[in-house]
Image (tube, rainbow, N blue to C red):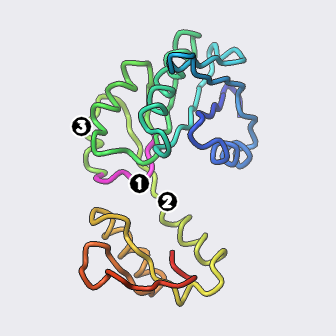
Amino acid sequence: MPNITLFSGSSHQDLSQRVANRLGLELGKVVTKKFSNQETSVETGESVRGEDVYIIQSGCGEINDNLMELLIMINACKIASSSRVTADKSHAPISAKPVVNMLSVAGADHIITMDMHASRIRGFFDIPVDNLYAEPAVLQWIRENTAEWKNCIIVSPEAGEAKRVTSIFSFLFLITQFPYKPSWCGLNLGPNFI
């Protein structure tokens, strides 16, 4: 794949490496560190002039620090004359509009999200935003990595995810539970809890 550089933020380097392996690419060299005052520093170790740059930074862990790191990485690539910067900001938060605006101001030309809570809000952004769905990969992972998946219970982490869990249930024909139901309290889920 010519003219593509793939960088990983520090939020999920294993995911980034798997994406790079799947695409047959090497991850770009990047060094992230914190100064003594906790300010984030990011240095890219290679030229991105004229390149289409993709930066993978998930929405897990230290979310605010990861967002700042992503903004700095985008800006560094734009200053270094990259052709285009696409940021993968998996799991877009409810504050997606201001976050995408910040990414755009930093220099992002395109945003890729994963499992956005309300995909209809993509139309409110000023730059292209693509929302990918993890459900097919989740279904495959459950079938391949959970020995007795037909005896499992899938639990939604929050009420807003109930629709997604119900969809997974319909494909796997499993029992579904939602934490906001009073009958859920005190239930011993056992070893096959997903």
Tell me the mark number nearer the camera, choosing from 3 and 2: 2
Q: Which mark is residue 115?
A: 1
What's the residue type where badge 2 is placed?
Ala
Tell me the mark number nearer the camera, choosing from 1 and 3: 1
Q: Which stretch did the figure color magenta?
A: 112-118
Q: Which residue is mark 2?
A: 134
Q: Residue at x 46, y 39 (%)?
A: 89
Q: Quadrant of the N terminus?
A: top right
Query: N-terminal of the two: label 3 or label 2?
Result: 3
- Residue 22 painted magenta: no
Q: Residue at x 56, y 64 (%)?
A: 137
92 in relation to 182, above or below? above
Contact flag, marks 1 and 2 (Cβ < 8 Å): yes
Q: Nearer the viewer, residue 171 or 95?
A: 95
Q: Nearer the viewer, residue 94 or 38?
A: 38
**Which residue is farthest bottom?**
151
Lateral position of residue 180 relative to residue 46, left or right: left
Query: N-terminal of the two: label 1 or label 3?
Result: 1
Q: Which residue is mark 3?
A: 124
